[in-house]
Amino acid sequence: MKSFPMFINVADKTIVVVGGGEQAAQKTRLALKTEARLLLVADALDDELRQLVARGRATQVSSDGLVDALQQARFAFVATGCAGADASVAGIARDVGVLVNVVDRPDLCDLTTPALVDRDPVVIAIGTEGTAPVLARQIKTRIEELLEPKLGDLAALAGRLRNAVAHKVPRARHRAFWRWVFVGAPRRSFASGRETEAARAIKEAIDARGQVEQTAGKGLVSLVGAGPGAADLMTLRGVQRLQEADVIFYDRLVDPGVLELARRDAERVYVGKKPGAHHWPQDRINRVIAAAALAGKRVVRLKCGDPLVFGRAAEEAEALDAAGVEWEVVPGVTAALAAASQAKIFPTSRGKTQRLVLATGHSAKGAAEPDFVAEARPGGTIAYYMCVENADRMARALQSAGAPSDLLVQVVENAAHAQTRVFTGRLSELGQLVRDEGVSNPAVLFVEWPFPAAGCERAPRSASKAASRRSDRAAELSVV
């Protein structure tokens, strides 16, 4: 290594930033994460830096005061925007014994600024000695996916309670206690936004002299939304649950790239759900995920899209409740929104549409046919899931309810996959479009019914009937 990695304590120390433009502002934003005093050496500052000075977070020093400012500095950032001036300031800094970082000049740098994963007080620095900053940012992104945003808060709480643990918990239990805090229920609670619950559990465990073994072995089922396809559309929390899982139950629509985000040694169980041909009946899935959790395993039930949107998560949650198993839902990007982004559709648009309805075009065996027109009226977009087989019936139902036959319809097949296809047509042609293009599920069908132009209002029949019923009801009340 040419550079020795270390963390420098700058609390109540001075960091100097030389320059007053955007480059200087970038370095100042980095320094603002610390508790250091900031001196900005420049005769003129941009608006962002002027605001910092006005709020008292930084102090401006004229260029005449450069040497005096540097003599106070722990280190300095040099970002004047002029190559000659940067080199001159770097030389002056070295003359007074101050280490410098010069923007975009690794040959003049004593210090380089790493890419940071900031979960204060947990901070991870990634450096390439100035050779490959893009690579450093890519590595940072991967680590960001692994560490939940609230991890720093948990670490800070642990730091505040460390003395209490030292006094109340026998030394022989320290390792198991802290492992429970950072691997067990407290960390899961923090990650899910239940900080108060986690803090209470930790304090109760401290008062119990660190006896946490009886709770550490309980399993958890995470109903995780894998998103519509592409692995990089997974949420950070979803990736974290995959990294923690002992066993993963997944469906046919989950992209293989998503499973690559899981731990290498996690067990993967394909449950093979397919409309009309369920290799694994739902009740069997309910039983096996509950059994795995009751055996003390961390379970992920991985579902395409968002478990809360036509994902049958409610059935699994009810079964887990009945079995006494703790569960959580980790939302994902639902297929309709991913499909809309790929087709460059705006499902809501001011003055045109103000409602987005998510509807299913497929019913469970033995259930009533979907109601295709319940929310159909001007000013809205309806996204129909799994409606390919019923495209003709859906189109006829909408037109019978008053929808114009020339409404714009867009069909997105395999949203967020390499095989994505997008088609556009008119409502009256939808069935034929689906057949001609050989569209198959998974697909989302969008029907946009904008507000009518001024003077051309045309109410749907269903809406007219509803208005008539309201009028009749009002007459009845007036008589009473």
Image: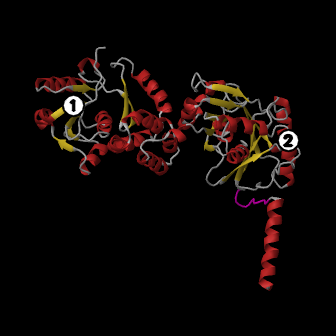
Identify the image quadrant of the N terminus: top left
| Left or right: 29 as drawn, with respect to 471 | left
Q: Quadrant of residue 391?
A: top right
Label annotation for residue 349: none
View extreme (bottom): residue: 480
Badge 2: few (under 14), some or many (20 or more) residues near its Cα, within 10 Å? some
Q: Position of residue 219 (x, y in %)?
A: 60, 38
Dot 1: what SS? strand
Q: Picture coordinates of residue 42 (x, y %)?
A: 20, 38
Q: Quadrant of the C terminus?
A: bottom right
Q: Residue at x 20, y 35 (%)?
A: 16
Assign a secondary structure to mark 2: loop
Which residue does the image show at 17% across and 24% down from the upper left?
88
Q: Residue at x 68, y 41 (%)?
A: 336
Which residue position is annotated with label 2?
390
Task: Give the camera-side residue of 278 and 130.
Answer: 278
**For the magenta stretch, what is the residue range?**
453-459
Disc nearer the start of the sequence (2/1) = 1
Query: To which residue does mark 1 refer?
Result: 76
